[in-house]
Amino acid sequence: MHNNKGKHTYKYDCRKSFKINDMQSAVNSGVIYKATLVASVGGLLFGYDTAVISGAIGFMRSFYQLSDIMTGWVASCALLGCIAGAMYSSKLSDRAGRKKVLMLSAVLFTISSIGTAIAPNLWFFVLFRIIGGMGIGIASMLSPMYISEMAPASVRGRLISVFQLGIVTGILVIYFVNAYIAGIHNEAWNISTGWRWMFGSGVIPSLIFILLLLTVPESPRWLASQKKHSEAMAILSQINGNTAAQQELNSINESLKDEAPFSLASLKGSKLKKALITGILLAVFSQFTGINAIMYYAPEIFKSTGTGRDSAFIQTIMVGVINVAFTLIAIKYVDSWGRKKLLLSGISGMTVCLFIVGLAFYTQQQGYLVLIAILGYIAFFAMSLGPLTFVVIAEIFPTKSRATAMSIATFFLWLAVFLVSQTFPILIGSIGSAYTFWLYTLISILAFLFIRKSFPETKGKTLEEIEASWTKE
C-alpha cells in the first residue's frame, strides 16, 4: 500500500509507486520490475495484434469486397485462435513452465505477422490471423499469471496492471503505425498494399519479446510445484532476501501440500467454485460492456460521425493516449484504493458514457459529442475493468489449479470478445447505433450490481491468503 509520510508527494513516480518494502535493495526490486516489464511485452503484442485490424479493416473491406457479416468475421477470426490458446496454455504451462510457453506465444506472433502480410488470398490471411490469435490467447493468460507469481502482495495489483499498460501501449503504437502507413501513398495503394504493411509491422515487437524472455527467470511458484525447491528459493531470495524467501517458500509448499489437483468435478460443493464463477463473470462483463467493439471499429465509428477518414485516424490515436493515461491511474491506486472501489467507480462512469453515446446517435447530434463520450468511456474502462480483470483472475486461484482455472476464465473472456466483435456490425445494421450502445449500457449496470454484491476485496493479501479466504467462507 502506498505510504505517504513526511515530505512524500503524490507526483507520479514509477519507482516510488512500485516500492516493495524498505528492507529490499534496488537490485532486488529490479528483478521484479524487469520480470514485470518483459512479461508485459506480451501485453503489448496482445494490444498491437488485436488493434491492427482497426486501421486495416476499411481497406480490406474494399480489397475483398466484404459484406457486413464477412467484415465481422475477418475482424474477429483471430479470436478463434485466442480461445484455443487460452484453452491449451494451462496444460502447456504446467508441464513446460510459464517462461517457455510465453516464448511459444512470441513465436506464434512472429509467424502470424509474416503470414498475414504475404497471404495470397483471404483464407490464408484468416489462417495466419488464427495462429496469431493463439499467441494472444497464451499471452493473455500467462503474462498476468507469471507476474502474479513473481510479485509481492503489497504491489501485486500494480504490477499485474502493468500488463494492461502493455496492452494499451500496443494499441496506441499500432494506431500511430497504421496512420503513418495510411499516409504514405493514396487510397488505391492502401487498398492493395498498405494494409499488408500494417500487419507485417508486428514482426519487430514479436522478435523483441523473444529476446527479452531469454533474460528473465522462471516463476518460483511453478518451480515449487515441480519440487524444484532450490531453484525456487534462489529466485525468491533475489526478490525478497533469504529470510523472507524461506518464509514464502514454506507458505507456497504448505498450500501445494493441502491442495488437490484441479478438476471440474472437484468444484462440486467447493468454495473454490465461487472463485471460478467470479473470475468468469468478471471476464465476460469486461467484454460485454462493449470495449472491443469500440477498439476494433474506432476509425469506422468516428468516420460515421461525419468528421472524415483522416480525422477519424487522429481521433483513434486520441483513444490510445487516453487509454494509456488512465491505465497509469489504475496502476497508481489499485493497491491503495483496492480492486472493488476502482471497479465500481469505473463502471459507473462507463455506464453514463455509453448512455450518452447511444443518445447522441439517437438524436443524430453526433460529431464531437460522440468523440467526448467515447473518450470518457475509454478513460473509465482503462482505470477499472481493463487492468483489474487481469489482476483479479491472476490472483484469486490457488497455485496448483491457477493455470487451469485462469485458462477457463480467459477462455470465457475470449469467447465474449468473439461474440461482441461478431455481433457488433450486425447489431449496428439491424437495430442501429443508438440501441446497440444502450444494450451495452444495460450490461454495464448488471456488471455494477454483480461487483457491488458479490465481489471480494483482495488488496494486500498474499496469493496463499486469498486461497485460504475462499476455503474459509
Image (cartoon, grey):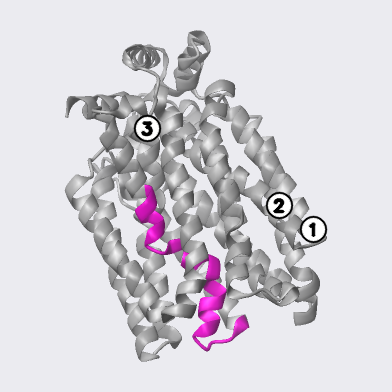
Query: Residue 225, image x and y in percent?
Result: 46, 16
> Which one is earlier in the sequence, the residue at label 3 or at label 2?
3
Decide: few, some or many residues near mark 3? Use Cα within 10 Å; few <14, some 14-19, many ≥20. Answer: many
Secondary structure under tag 2 reads: helix
Marks 3/1: CA distance? 47 Å
> Which one is earlier in the sequence, the residue at label 1 or at label 2?
1
Q: Nearer the viewer, mark 3 or mark 2?
A: 2
Residue pictured at 46% horizontal, 34% vertical: 145
Query: Can residue 365 be seen at all in this image of the molecule?
Result: yes
Quarter of the figure that contains the N terminus: top left
Residue type for callout 3: Ile
Quarter of the figure that contains the C terminus: top left
Residue type for callout 1: Ala
Residue type for callout 2: Leu
Decide: few, some or many residues near mark 2? Use Cα within 10 Å; few <14, some 14-19, many ≥20. Answer: some
Compared with 395, 96 (above or below) is above
Query: Residue 379, image x and y in percent?
Result: 38, 64
- Which residue does the numbered mark 2 point to in the structure image? 127
Compared with 387, 57 (above or below) is below
- Which residue does the numbered mark 3 point to in the structure image? 20
- Which residue does the numbered mark 1 point to in the structure image? 119
What's the mark number on residue 348?
Answer: none
Query: Can residue 331 be seen at all in this image of the molecule?
Result: no
Segment tinted magenta in the rendering: 283-309
Residue 285 drawn in magenta: yes
